[in-house]
Image (spheres, helix red, strand yellow):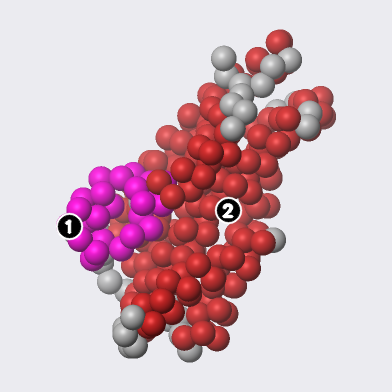
Amino acid sequence: MINIVTAPLWLAFFILTLRGFGVLTLGMQILQLFLWAAYAFALYSSWLWGFGNGIIEEGYEGILENVMSTVNNILIHVIGWGIAYSIYTLLDLVALVVSFYIIFGLIISIRDPILLIISIVLASLQLLFISTIYAMLVIKLRSNWVITDIMQFLMPTLGGLIPSETSRYVTMINEYSPIAYPFILMRESALGYLELPIPIIYQIIYSIITVTSLFIITAILVRIFDRRLREEGKLGLT
């Protein structure tokens, strides 16, 4: 639950710092860009630390072994928990919207609500599978939290957190990074503009292809993980 409190504060602190250096006026569109960037960061942080690290803890505590004896399918358990967890992450968005209204008087306007819902669903599924893949790969490491901390900041940078208007290098990253599109779609649906020179429908298709590919990789790795845990009683893929 701590994420619901910290998610709105880190970016609010950044904006207030800008005001302290003389940047006194921030347009509503800029504030909305900051809000959606904050939500993207909150999603990455929540899924990596809350969900991915949660799978690792389940492995350490023997919960996954109990799941194998009852559900008989770790993948079903992971996806079911992920769907439930995605509802929790919506509280981050609510906290951000309320905080930005209180601090900056921002009232968000959504130009395309359906596209926003699609983008949030795609982002959640994408992060569900990425977090699961990550957990399968690092569960054997003693100090996996160090990698999680690095990933928490590296992945958002490569995954669409920074608006493309920032620089041509960011535009290039956003255009060629397959995990960036759901977060770009969020901003486009909220602000009603085309951030990349790629039609919306193609961005959605690219996102669906990425999510599907991640699901296939997740299913393969979880199956290997499941087999090793059953046959050797050991965590990890090797």
Q: Is residue 190 above or below residue 27?
A: above
- The image shows a total of numbered marks equal to 2
**Amino acid type shown at disc 1:** Arg
Spot occupied by residue 197 in the image (x, y as percentages of width and height): 19, 59
Q: Which residue is mark 1?
A: 168
Q: Is residue 89 left or right of residue 203?
A: right
**Amino acid type shown at disc 2:** Ser
31 inside magenta stretch: no
Q: Are marks 2 and 1 in contact (CB under 8 Å)?
A: no
Nearest to the observer: residue 173 or residue 189: 173
Alpha-carbon neighbours of circle 1 within 10 Å: few (<14), some, or many (≥20)? few
172 inside magenta stretch: yes
- Residue at position x 48%, y 89% in the image: 105
Mark 2 or 1 closer to N-term?
2
In the picture, residue 184 is in which quadrant? bottom left
* C-alpha distance separating marks 2 and 1: 29 Å
Nearest to the observer: residue 196 or residue 163: 163
Residue extent of the magenta highlight: 155-179
- Residue at position x 48%, y 75% in the image: 12
Image quarter of the N terminus? bottom right
Residue 143 in view, yes or no: yes
Alpha-carbon neighbours of circle 2 within 10 Å: few (<14), some, or many (≥20)? many
Spot occupied by residue 13 in the image (x, y as percentages of width and height): 48, 73
Spot occupied by residue 127 in the image (x, y as percentages of width and height): 51, 46
Image quarter of the C terminus? top right
Q: Which mark is residue 46?
A: 2
